[in-house]
Amino acid sequence: MAHSPAFLALIDSVHSSVPDVTVEHTRARLRANPDLKFVDVREDSEWAAGHASGAIHIGKGVIERDIEEKIPDKNAELILYCGGGFRSVLAGDALKKMGYTNVSSMAGGWREWKVVGAPTEQP
């Protein structure tokens, strides 16, 4: 998918506040930290079509509204993912601005998760 220059500039402007992690790193952290919150920020229809095993769904459109109820611990380790790694960076930046301290974005998102054969599920 080709993204507009303005969208890519927006991503670049916030990317320094939300580090990227690889799928391999994410899987290792999921094994090492059972309290890690692996958050799918894609649209409801994308989630329903399939998602990473162990993930919870809080769509980017509602994450600022719902995050404190679903994950009240602002020091919790959060790894966000979307389709390719852009929306999760934007959502992560918003969470950082809300006081969440340990937020990262899974580079490559859902597409990369599937490419490496990581476990998936459907609701």
Image: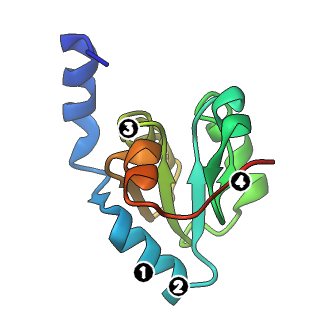
- In the rendered structure, the answer to whether residue 4 lies left or right of residue 36 reads left
Task: Name the residue: 53% across, 48% down.
Answer: 98
Q: Secondary structure at mark 3?
A: loop
The CA distance from mark 4 to mark 1 is: 26 Å
Q: Earlier in the sequence, mark 1 or mark 3?
A: 1
Give the CA separation, mark 4 to mark 3. 25 Å
- Name above or below for residue 65 compared with residue 113: above
C-beta proximity under 8 Å, tags 4 and 1: no
Quadrant of the drawing holding the N terminus:
top left
Which of disc 1 and disc 4 is earlier in sequence?
1
Tell me if 121 is positioned left or right of 96 in this view. right
Label drawn at residue 68: 4
What's the distance in space between the residues labelled 2 and 1, CA to CA?
5 Å
Separation of marks 3 and 2 at Cα, in angstroms: 23 Å
Q: CA distance from mark 1 to mark 3?
A: 20 Å
> Which sits in the foreground, 24 or 59?
24
Q: How many marks?
A: 4
The residue identified by callout 2 is 31
**Residue extending furthest toward the bottom:** 32
Q: Nearer the viewer, mark 4 or mark 1?
A: 1
Q: Look at mark 1 in the image and give the residue it sits on.
A: 28
Whether label 4 touches label 3, CB < 8 Å: no
Identify the amino acid type marked 1.
Answer: Ala
- State the image coordinates of residue 28 (x, y, percent, origin top left): 42, 80
